Image (cartoon, rainbow, N blue to C red):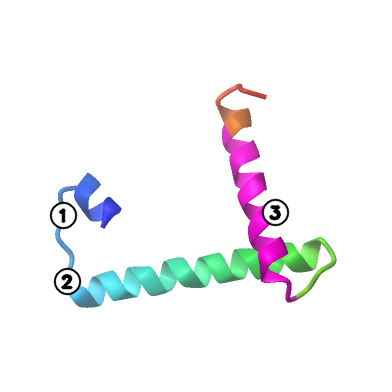
Amino acid sequence: EMQQNASRDSWSFEKTEERLAQIMHNIHDACAETAEKYGAPGDYVLGANITGFIRVADAMRSLGVI
């Protein structure tokens, strides 16, 4: 919805479901890959936390905050 509102666009139910499924798939993959990379395969909480931390740190670096 946020993307639709930002672009002043309206999506069909099918397109919305397709986009949501892709987003969720990407989130799952990122969490699983990160958990495995840091020695905890299958630990999605750890994977999600580390992935989120890395994304925030990267954003802060790109803005020159750190």
Q: Which residue corresponds to the image point at 65% horizontal and 38% vertical from the top-left?
A: 57
Q: Is residue 52 left or right of residue 1?
A: right
In the image, what residue type sits under mark 2?
Answer: Ser
Q: Position of residue 15 (x, y in %)?
A: 25, 72
Report the Cα–Cα distance between label 2 and label 3.
34 Å
Q: Which residue corresponds to the image point at 63% horizontal and 29% vertical from the top-left?
A: 61
The quadrant in which residue 59 appears is top right
Q: Position of residue 39 (x, y in %)?
A: 85, 66
Query: Furthest residue to the right?
Result: 39
**Badge 2: residue crowd in 10 Å (few <14, some 14–19, many ≥20):** few
Name the mark on residue 9. Answer: 1
The quadrant in which residue 17 appears is bottom left
Which secondary structure lies at badge 2? loop
**Badge 3: residue crowd in 10 Å (few <14, some 14–19, many ≥20):** some
Report the Cα–Cα distance between label 2 and label 1.
10 Å
Q: Is residue 11 left or right of residue 27?
A: left
The quadrant in which residue 33 appears is bottom right
